[in-house]
Amino acid sequence: MNGADSKEETEEQQHVMSEVHLGCPPGISGPHISRFTISLPPEIESSRFNELFKVGESSTDQEIGFDEDGDLVLPRRRQASRHCFTMKIQHNITSSIPSVGLQVWKAELVLSDFVLHKMCTSTEFDGIVALELGAGTGLAGMLLAHAAKTIFLTDHGDEILANCVKNVQLNSGVFNCEDVVYVRELDWLQPWPPKLSLDLASQERFSWSSSELEEVRKAALLLAADVIYSDDLTDAFFGILEGLMSQGLEKVLYLALEKRYNFSLDDLDVVANGYSHFRSYLREECECEGLEPSSFPYFTGRRINVAEIPQYVGEYDRGKDVELWQIGYNKGKP
């Protein structure tokens, strides 16, 4: 057995678990359906999606207190009105490393908050064609479907893709998104565009058509969440990203990631796996100002302040290690 085979076998045997557990019963690994409440933040006044954010009620409990005699005072349950809707997401509670797309991760929820905020406060995403890389359970892309013309949810592996299709079906009543959303296979280790099958009868369930690939050329928006956690994966990600962004319309990528820290024997320190390698691919936008156009292509990056994005998705804690990046691609001078 060579080193690559040994590494793949270890990853298949090693199971990991996301921090995101919404009503998940203990002792099972999945699949499990969680309900995510999406609420319009109090500071946001938006009439663009009144049919989506319907008025509902949520229960809030006051703290238990005592009267002046020291007797226990039981609080009454209060009802607070809010504009909200619910998304159903089927996901695993644990998975092997190659199948982490079966779980819901914190960065995906931050990206969902960003997408919702853009949709509620601007028309930037209205009528666009978009593609999500490493879509996993598909939450962020499905939310975008309410504004976009077409959204391609892409990932690798039949199990992950079938689970994503299931989530599109679970939420078709919320967005009517089955006519807008396409779940497609995208292997980052293969060049873009994917090869087409000439035999229509033998085409796979998640394969691309020539018309869909032409539609991706018109895409202006790319999304990705929690795809940065190893150097090999980062290399593959930027390889496929260059293929996508160098063709067709100018594209922007919004990428959410969570820095995960581990002790490194090479560095003899606690480091965030993959993060430094990710940053090595980017030129900060401020560094490029005033410079002569380069004859070589390169990626530009700008970190977005997550604290300025209101939280729409309930029941999760963002923590301090999630970042959101806006990434562009300079094709260079011909």
Image (cartoon, rainbow, N blue to C red):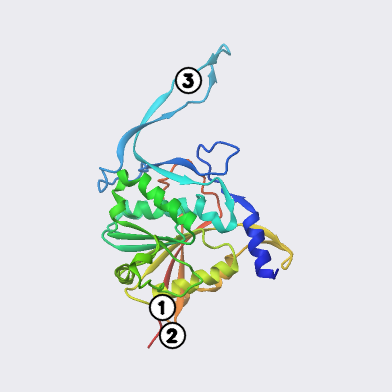
Q: What amino acid is labelled 1 in the image?
A: Asn
Tell which circle, 1 or 2, labels the residue nearer the N-terminal end: 2
Residue identified by numbered label 3: 75
Tell which circle, 3 or 2, labels the residue nearer the N-terminal end: 3
- Kindly tell me whether residue 307 is visible in this rendering: no
Q: Residue at x 71, y 67 (%)?
A: 267
Q: Is residue 47 or residue 212 the one in the foreground?
A: 212
Frontmost of labels 3 and 1 is 1
What is the total number of numbered labels drawn onto the structure image? 3
Q: What amino acid is labelled 3 in the image?
A: Pro
Secondary-structure class at tag 1: strand
- Kindly tell me whether residue 109 is visible in this rendering: yes
When the figure is inspected, residue 62 is found, relative to residue 120, above or below; the finding is above
Crowdedness of circle 3 by 10 Å Cα count: few (<14), some, many (20+)? Answer: few
Q: In the figure, residue 29 lies in which quadrant?
A: top right
Crowdedness of circle 2 by 10 Å Cα count: few (<14), some, many (20+)? Answer: few
Residue 222: x %, y % from top left? 39, 64
Residue 88's disc is none
Residue 331: x %, y % from top left? 40, 80
Residue identified by numbered label 1: 330
Q: Which residue is drawn at 54% across and 63% down?
A: 228
Distance, label 3 to label 1, CA atoms, is 59 Å
Q: Which residue is drawn at 54% across and 72% down?
A: 235
Query: In this rendering, would 150 be left or right of 306?
Result: left
Residue identified by numbered label 2: 294
| Labels 3 & 2 near each other (Cβ < 8 A) | no
For the C terminus, give its image quadrant: bottom left
| Labels 3 & 1 near each other (Cβ < 8 A) | no
Distance, label 1 to label 2, CA atoms, is 8 Å
Distance, label 3 to label 2, CA atoms, is 66 Å
